[in-house]
Image (cartoon, grey):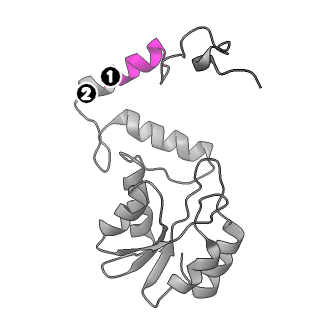
Amino acid sequence: MGNLAITGGEALRQEPWPMWPPYTEREKELLLTVLESHNWGGYPSPNFQARRFAEEFAKYHGAKYGVCAANGTVTLEMALRALGVEAGDEVIVPSNSWVATAACAVYLNAVPVFVDLRPDNFTIDHSKIEAAITEKTKAIIPVHLGSSIADMDAIMEIANKHNVF
């Protein structure tokens, strides 16, 4: 392998990276339409664009319903609410993840229970989940991190065995 560009080697890319996120005039028009409507959200959404997006997204995925949410933290909280997680319940989460993974449980006054990671891929260590399960455990939130996939077969086997989500 040759020298890196920073140490005098040839750069692999000569022009700057494209700006992110890319958008077209159509997206700009749609965004301005929503912005100028002063209806940005709420439930049920007064914003026809948000409703339309939720319906089209659900249809695309073969689902009966779709709901828009502000961010991933809110979607995780919604999922836990839908599962009936409430104050005092426990939710198993990996010890290294974005704050949303544990925060969604805290928002419901549930308790996040941290489980250590696998040293080979830094996802939740399924071999340590069972020891963390108590009578208060309601759910396990695995996280696929940096293209590493949590062992969902093993995790689902444990969840099914203990009747947790």
Vertical comparison of 142 with 147: above or below:
below
Rendered location of residue 102, percent (x, y): 39, 64
Can you identify the residue that label 2 sits on? 37
Secondary structure beneath label 1: helix
Which of the 4 image quarters holds residue 108? bottom left
In the image, taking residue 27 as reference, residue 87 lies left or right, namely left
Q: Position of residue 123 (x, y in %)?
A: 59, 61
Judging from the image, what secondary structure is the residue with disc 2 in?
helix
Q: In which quadrant of the rendered image does the C terminus lie? A: bottom right
Q: Amino acid at mark 2?
A: Ser
Above or below for 78 versus 36: below
* Marks 1,2: beta carbons within 8 A: yes
Residue 31 among those drawn in magenta: yes
The number of callouts visible is 2
Tell me where residue 31 sits by quadrant. Answer: top left
Q: Which residue is located at x 42 percent, y 86 percent?
A: 136
Disc 1 marks which amino acid?
A: Thr
Tell me if mark 1 has few (under 14), some (14-19) or many (20+) residues whose alpha carbon lies within 10 angstroms of its own.
few
Q: Which residue matches tag 1?
A: 33
**Residue appearing at x 61%, y 42% in the figure:** 60
